[in-house]
Image (cartoon, rainbow, N blue to C red):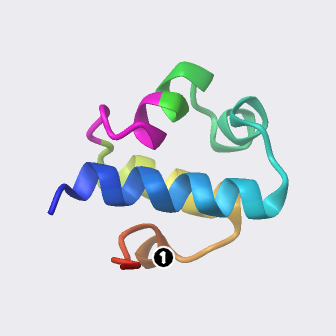
Amino acid sequence: MDIKAVVGRNVKQHREAKGLSQEQLAFEADLHRTYVSGVERGIRNPTVLIVAKLANALGVEPSKLLELND
């Protein structure tokens, strides 16, 4: 299991469900768009603080970004 890929898939799923672009999510989370892109592609290893920022911007609990949805 690649946790970076899991987080990335969940961030993308929640972002798209909210109808947000990567740029809009990045603005709401106070991150750079390329960082959000890297998280979604599973090449960035976000810290717990970044996971919390993304979850807050998406309006979900941080645990939702760590769920295995197989």
Residue 50: x, y in percent? 43, 47
The outermost residue toward the right is 19
Which quadrant holds residue 15? bottom right
**Total number of numbered labels?**
1
Is disc 1 placed on a helix, strand or loop?
helix
Q: Name the amino acid type tagged 1.
A: Lys
Label 1, residues with CA under 10 Å away: few <14, some 14-19, many ≥20: some
The outermost residue toward the left is 1
Q: Identify whether 66 is placed above or below 54.
A: below
Which residue corresponds to mark 1? Answer: 64
Residue 35: x, y in percent? 48, 26
Q: Is residue 18 rendered magenta in the image?
A: no
The C terminus, quarter of image: bottom left
Q: Is residue 50 left or right of residue 60?
A: left
Residue 23: x, y in percent? 73, 29
Q: Nearer the viewer, residue 55 or 2?
A: 2
Q: Is residue 27 left or right of residue 55?
A: right
Q: Identify whether 50 is placed above or below 13.
A: above
Residue at image coords 48%, 76%? 64
Which residues make up the magenta segment?
38-45
Q: Nearer the viewer, residue 66 or 50?
A: 66
Which quadrant holds residue 1? bottom left
Residue 30: x, y in percent? 63, 34
Magenta stretch: helix, strand or loop mostly: loop
Residue at image coords 70%, 42%? 25
Q: Nearer the viewer, residue 50 or 36?
A: 36
Q: Identify whether 23 is placed above or below 40.
A: above
Residue at image coords 73%, 43%? 28
Residue at image coords 42%, 39%? 39
